Amino acid sequence: MEEKATKIQKSSLKTKVQKFGTSLSSMIMPNISSLIAWGLITAIFMAAGWWPNAKIATLIDPMKLYLIPLLIAYVGGRMVYNERGAVVGAIAVMGVIVGSNIPMFLGAMIMGPLGGWCMKKFDQVFRDKIKTGFEMLYDNFSSGIMGMILAIFGLFIVNPLVVAGNNLISKGVDWIISIHMLPLANIFIEPAKVLFLNNAVGNGILVPLGIQQSASAGKSILFLLEADPGPGLGILLAFMIFGKGMAKASAPGAAIIQFFGGIHEIYFPYVLMKPALILAAIAGGVSGTFTFSLLGTGLKAAASPGSIIAVLLMTPKGNYLQILTGVAVAAVVSFVVAALILKADKSEDTGDLSANQAKMEQMKAASKGKDLPSTQAATQSAQAATQSVKAYKDVKRIIFACDAGMGSSAMGASLLRDKVKKAGIKNIPVTNTAISRLKDEDGLLVITQAELADRAQQKTPSAMHIAVDNFLSSNKYDEVVLNLKTLSQIDPQAAKKEAVSKAAQTSDQISQLDFQAIKEVDFIHHDQHVGSATMATSLFKDRLKKAGKHVPVKNMEIDDLDDSQAHLVIVTKEAEKNLKLRYTEIQVVSVDNLLEAKEYDYIVEHLA
């Protein structure tokens, strides 16, 4: 009992650490492109760059001092309290930025969430007390006044504290580098990466510090501590030569994805299979950082993802040989240590392969009508299979969730999407996102890494959850597809009736449209459908153009509509209910897929 309580406590502590680290990295990750833009402009057009240009170089300081901190604070405020929190966070950070000649990234990571939190608490107290008709007045003035107060607070209180803290941290980092002790940081960074804290460590801590160092020194070694692809490459190369079973077979593909694609998460399961391999990762990280430090090199800006391509793009002029040497040393050292560990391992470990083979044999036997060990076992197996299928009956959407919502989860979603498509399963979208952006809803199946499962369940308690060890190789994907496929075949008559009902509903929507009144077609974007609505607008314009029709087509936010029959609004079925609650006169058509819907041909044909 005590042992169980200890495990729960450890899991809770790890979850809290992951959540804090993710909060930091979540402010940086959406703004990586701005960091890359700043880094490229600096590397190419500064006085010592590839093609010096004094005019273009005038962009460097404003982007560093104003644009990036404002973006970080905006995202930080939005994390806490949507758009109101984002705006107040951006206003608040100006107080920290003004009067300082250093990039206020740390100040932005404080003031952004603080602004969102203060606005959220203020609204909780006063919003319900506002009289009808005064909502907009309250919204605008409350956020403006709150932003003003926080900006002044930031100017006089937070700014001096951040400047003092920044100077202390900078001196500390410089001192550690001067005595060549920075490589020891990898003793902590490499295990943290394997525990899926890589984005928290890299983007939450090292990147902000690295930007400030790069702003003054022109480059920073801190960008390489977590992004160096060498240690992971060395481990995967060792598996290619000395590994066994499925691990050996999958290592070559994993090495290509890790080194050139920059998705470091792909080698974490290999380390977790044999925890002693963490020593190889540490040895590679320490040796690589020591080499970078010895050769006095670094990057201009963050290399994200940690691909050798991204690393070289962010390398300052004249530093390519030093960077490649450091990466090579890290790879060789981690390879040697991993090879020794794998060669010393005498166990016949084939990973998940043997378990999958046993499961496959059972399925073959069942399909051929062979007897299982006992009637009771057969009954239990049948009951388990039935329960498994029933668990999927409400699934309407599948989401892969990882720490950052980019690399590994995107690849996992792509793999399952392909399997779902080949199985002929329709109307179940497969997407990916960051755990911090998950929203609890019915009909959701969340797939995440085992290390992050606790956080995913906390964010979406109503969803169905599946935890996997490796997004890129899991037998559970086949189980998901099999259950969804079986479910669709359980009651074909019911499925047929549902399809007829939906068709009738769509037909009613179309038949009730007053095409003579329609003067404009609008696509509404919301949540994860922003990109889809933008693309759908462009595709629909092309349809009208080919048909010789000249009705304007716009991509709009739901709040910007005019309540008039002149507007034909095309939305997803999720947004239809919200739209009809706000407007009574507009004409609405809801579709399953904004990009391609059977209703479009009829609409284009009947528009004036």
Image (cartoon, helix red, strand yellow):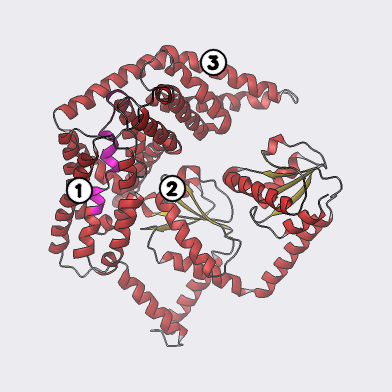
Q: Which residues are magenta?
A: 215-233
- As displayed, is residue 72 above or below residue 227? above
Measured as percent of width and height from the top left, residue 546 is found at 72, 54
Pointer 2 residue: 406
Work out whether residue 290 or residue 604 is closer to the camera in this orientation and state it. Answer: 604
The answer, for residue 4, to whether it is visible in the render is no
Q: Is residue 454 left or right of residue 190?
A: right
Secondary structure, mark 2, is: loop
Label 3 crowd (10 A; few <14 / some 14-19 / many >=20): some
Q: Is residue 573 left or right of residue 454?
A: right
Q: CA distance from mark 1 to mark 2?
A: 26 Å
Q: CA distance from mark 3 to mark 1?
A: 51 Å
- As displayed, is residue 197 above or below residue 139? below
The amino acid pointed to by label 3 is Met
Pointer 3 residue: 148
Camera-near label (1 vs 2) is 1
Q: CA distance from mark 2 to mark 3?
A: 35 Å
The amino acid pointed to by label 2 is Met
User: Which of pointers 1 and 2 lies earlier in the amino acid sequence?
Assistant: 1
Camera-near label (3 vs 1) is 1
